Image: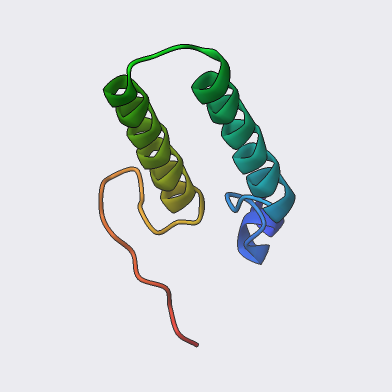
Amino acid sequence: MAALRASGYLGVMPLMNVVLTLVVVGVILWLINTYIPMQGTIKSILNLVVVIAVVLWLLYGFGVLSHSGDIHLPVVK
């Protein structure tokens, strides 16, 4: 476990998982927008909430935001 953490693998989302999750969320949002009749403002609010949730998930997943709310900048080596 310590070797995985030292190599940087543990805690970093693999790219395939990120792409697959984005595709699934996008398809689900498209299906909801296409096949469930809703008022335009409700669709806009739903889309905004989903986009904000996905952006926050990506920021947490790639380590830009930590769970304490601090913003971490990438380290230039």
Residue furthest bottom as drawn: 77
From the viewer's side, name the closer residue of 11 and 5.
Answer: 11
Say above or below: 36 vs 61.
above
Q: Residue at x 36, y 50 (%)?
A: 66
Toward which corner of the image does residue 6 lie, by quadrant?
A: bottom right
Count of residue discs: 0
From the viewer's side, name the closer residue of 25 and 42.
Answer: 42
From the viewer's side, name the closer residue of 25 and 32.
Answer: 32
Residue furthest right as drawn: 16
Where does the image place residue 44, in percent across and percent down from the top left?
A: 33, 31
Left or right position of 37 against 1: left
Left or right position of 68 against 31: left
Left or right position of 48 against 36: left
Say above or below: 5 vs 48.
below
Q: Residue at x 28, y 45 (%)?
A: 68
Q: Residue at x 45, y 85 (%)?
A: 76
Where does the image place residue 2, in percent across and percent down from the top left?
A: 65, 53
Where does the image place residue 59, in percent across and percent down from the top left?
A: 42, 52
From the viewer's side, name the closer residue of 5 and 71.
Answer: 71
Toward which corner of the image does residue 72 lie, by quadrant?
A: bottom left
Q: Residue at x 58, y 32 (%)?
A: 25
Where does the image place residue 3, in percent across and percent down from the top left?
A: 70, 58
